[in-house]
Image (cartoon, grey):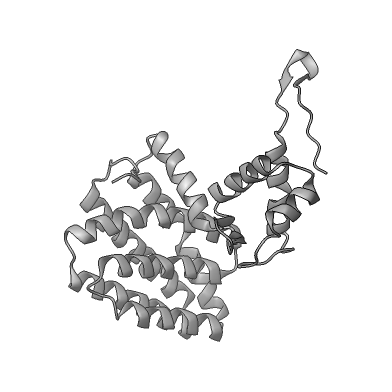
Amino acid sequence: MVKSPTTESGGRGGGRVRVPKTAELVAARIRRQIIRGEVEEGDALLPEAELMAEFGVSRPTLREAFRILESESLISVTRGSRGGARVHPPDIRVAARYAGLYLQYAGVTLEDVQDARIVIEPPAARRLAERKDAKAIARLRALTEEEATVLEDAHAFAELSTRFHELVMELAGNQTMAMVVGMLHDIVETHAESSMARNLNVAATRRAVRSHEKLVGLIEAGDADGAEAHWRRHVQKAAQATLDAAGAKAVVDLFD
């Protein structure tokens, strides 16, 4: 049974400490199970009646816990006789959304976000070229081939192009940096897709794919200097294209 104190107590200096609600404690228990892999993607949680008995809580409390987890995109709930709660893994886009909201609230400009990309991404291309990992090269090449099939679809191309940049970071091996870049790219993709939808330039998307293909070739050749220099130029050009469309001093805006 999940127990939760019902009062607030004073800490050192007489401060008041907020006591978590029972629903928050239940959500924390289920969240822990998901993060630790004790329940896997797509798994259904136990029926409500069993969870209520397991945690010793009422149906309204359990459903409040579900709403917390749904807001974090860790579960989805369907109602009805065949309904229930199903598990989803943590999604980088949820983190990116919250990060983007904070940056927008703080008045951060797109130029600021793009500057961060230019600092972070090129060294990842160098690391990939130094490793010359065949599986990594194959995954990058497969993605460029997929990009080439959607040159006239602004939404699909923006999504795949963003994924290519994220994959470069992911395959470079530093998961923390990959997460940061994933968050930045999700913010950038929102603006890039919007500008592409207004003025789709197939010649430009084709050049972007060729640039991605060139990077894969440099990685495969083990040209670390060339890969880093090429990717720096590419990121700079891509960043400038977005800034030209939206305005260098435009504030991050996720509500366009």
Callout count: 0
Residue 69 percent coordinates (x, y): 60, 49
Q: Residue at x 43, y 45 (%)?
A: 100
Residue 226 percent coordinates (x, y): 41, 74
Q: Quadrant of the N terminus?
A: top right
Residue 243 percent coordinates (x, y): 26, 51
User: Relative to residue 17, is residue 254 depicted above or below?
Assistant: below
User: Relative to residue 239, is residue 41 depicted above or below?
Assistant: below
User: Relative to residue 188, is residue 138 depicted above or below?
Assistant: below
Q: Is residue 222 visible?
A: no
Residue 239 percent coordinates (x, y): 31, 56
Task: Report the side of 169 relative to 15 (left or right).
Answer: left
Depth order, front residue of 26/98: 26
Residue 65: name its quadrant: top right
Q: Is residue 256 visible?
A: yes
Q: Residue at x 75, y 55 (%)?
A: 50
Task: Report the side of 1 relative to 81 (left or right).
Answer: right
